Image: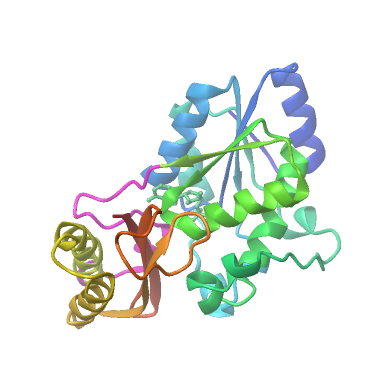
Amino acid sequence: MKLVSTVQELQSEIQHLAQGRTVGFVPTMGALHQGHISLVKQAVSENPVVVVSIFVNPTQFNDPADLERYPRTLENDMKLLEPTGCSIVFAPNAKEVYPEPDKRKFNFGKLEEVMEGKHRPGHFNGVAQVVSRLFDMVKPTKAYFGLKDFQQLAIVKNMVKQLQLPVEIVPCAIIREESGLAMSSRNELLTEEQRKNAAVISETLFKAKELKGQKSVQEITDWVTETINKNPFLDVEYFEIVDDEQLQPVKNWDEDSTKVGCVAVFCGKIRLIDNIVF
Ligand code: AMP
């Protein structure tokens, strides 16, 4: 496994290893956990060459304090990646990714008007900027994204379509801690007590799925919000039940679409997201 930090090293290493064979790519912001590792393992099982990028992208943070406190643990990340069979770790600095400020403005229409798009203005524009730049550098055959960031996956798919990029986007299942809490780099920022209480988020989503036959979409929405908010450590920013393509709110269970319940919750200052397919 090779650690590189410049685009030039990255590309010569890929060329050397791939020799025209497929390249799998897993973009991350580091502070890796088993959620990331599951993506890397899937990429390794499907491609002879796998690139993992580790870059805390400033343009996708709408809150400077969030960017500042985001965990950075390169040494540990390398230890976790070593046994996966990943070929190249690309850990550039901001100047390498953005030699000039990226002024591009993407238009994702309704997709970016809901949920994360609504509550984190500019976030998905930053995601599209960095993912498109990384795709341009790595030129992957397949890129792997977690379903935990459900809306991000929809945005990336839409961006690939808009820019007509020759890359296959592969969605990967949500990996959870034993308590059910969706794994996240931000979990490391929680106190032990907060982390224990944060399990209420996924517990409530699982229970909501069981209650689906007995309650309307609105009743489930209210129930999830109230149940999580009852926990003194948790404060729901939104819970919405949306269709899995346009991510627009659904009103009835019998509408013809797969429905996904998406939630964002503050646990102290730390913002956590999760979702469940109904
Ligand atoms: P991040 O480092 O948070 O930008 O995440 C990098 C990639 O890992 C994204 O595609 C995430 O959706 C994915 N990911 C993060 N946490 C999980 C998880 N618990 N399960 C599956 N994928 C995840």
Closest to the observer, 236 or 69: 236
Taking the spot 58% from the left edge, 65% from the top edge, the residue there is 111
Residue 95 is left or right of residue 142, and the answer is: right
Q: Is residue 199 magenta?
A: no
* Residue span colored magenta: 173-193
Q: Quadrant of the N terminus?
A: top right
Q: Quadrant of residue 181?
A: bottom left
Q: How is the image coloured?
A: rainbow
Taking the spot 25% from the left edge, 68% from the top edge, the residue there is 198
Magenta stretch prevailing secondary structure:
loop
Residue 229 at x, y percent in the picture: 23, 81
Q: Quadrant of residue 215?
A: bottom left
Residue 52 at x, y percent in the picture: 58, 39
With respect to residue 20, does 257 lie above or below? below
Closest to the observer, 58 or 76: 58
Residue 232 at x, y percent in the picture: 20, 83
